[in-house]
Image (cartoon, rainbow, N blue to C red):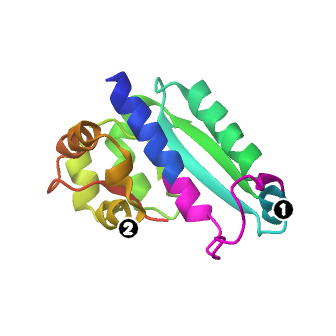
Amino acid sequence: MKRLIVLFTVMIFALLLVACGNNEETSQQSTSDSESNTDSNSNEESVHLTMSIAAGQNPERFRWEAEAFTEKYPHVTVEVVEYEEDWYNQNAVRLFNSSDRPDVAFFWLTGFYDSIVNSGALLPLDDLYESEGWYDVLPESTVEGAISQMGINMELHTLLL
């Protein structure tokens, strides 16, 4: 179970990186030149993201991850919103389809997951996995494990942004 939690945490923040990353080609810039990369981020438009989690899902860790993400990408702030677990499970479909929906959500794989996917609140991640080469980066057993537990047509899903 810890592996699954770590995988989802990595996937969430990888998704944040993709969603908030610079779209310009940077092939001429060396990877050791991270200082100028940080300086260019300061000129980017400010982005505020919300991430929803259920109480008991280690909110301190998610807040720490959000702070670390903001340190690396100063133009992006991530607000972690914690909901009582029963409320979150029972109202996820409504929350994820509302105008107040979070940009990113960590959600336990409960019986409510099928309802969330079937509501149309989530977008498949399969194309992103393919285009970004994530299948090549993540160990296959981890990817298969995550996909098999997602439960809907063997696809990974994420919140609409």
Q: Is residue 70 above or below residue 97?
A: above
Please identify the dominant SS of the magenta region. Answer: loop
Which mark is on residue 159? Answer: none
Label 1: how many Cα within 10 Å (few below 14, some 14–19, many 20+): few
Asked whether 111 or 76 is in front, the reply is 76
According to the picture, the residue beneath numbered tag 1 turns out to be 42
Q: Picture coordinates of residue 136 (x, y %)?
A: 33, 52
Residue at mark 2 to residue at mark 1: CA–CA distance: 28 Å
Q: Picture coordinates of residue 34 (x, y %)?
A: 76, 53
Q: Is residue 14 in view from this perspective?
A: yes
Residue shown at the point (28%, 37%) measured from the top left: 142
Image quarter for residue 112?
Answer: top left
Image quarter for residue 125?
Answer: bottom left
Image: magenta residue range: 15-35
Are dots 2 and 1 in contact, CB under 8 Å? no
User: The disc labelled 2 sits on which kind of residue?
Assistant: Ser
Circle 1 sits in a helix, a strand or a loop, which is it? loop
Q: Return the residue found at the far bottom.
A: 24
Q: Picture coordinates of residue 15 (x, y %)?
A: 49, 55
Residue shown at the point (47%, 30%) measured from the top left: 84
Q: Is residue 14 above or below residue 45?
A: above
According to the picture, the residue beneath numbered tag 2 turns out to be 131
User: The disc labelled 1 sits on which kind of residue?
Assistant: Ser
Q: Is residue 86 above or below residue 129?
A: above
Q: Is residue 85 left or right of residue 114?
A: right
2 or 1: mark nearer the eye: 2
Q: Is residue 71 left or right of residue 6?
A: right
Q: Is residue 103 in view from this perspective?
A: no
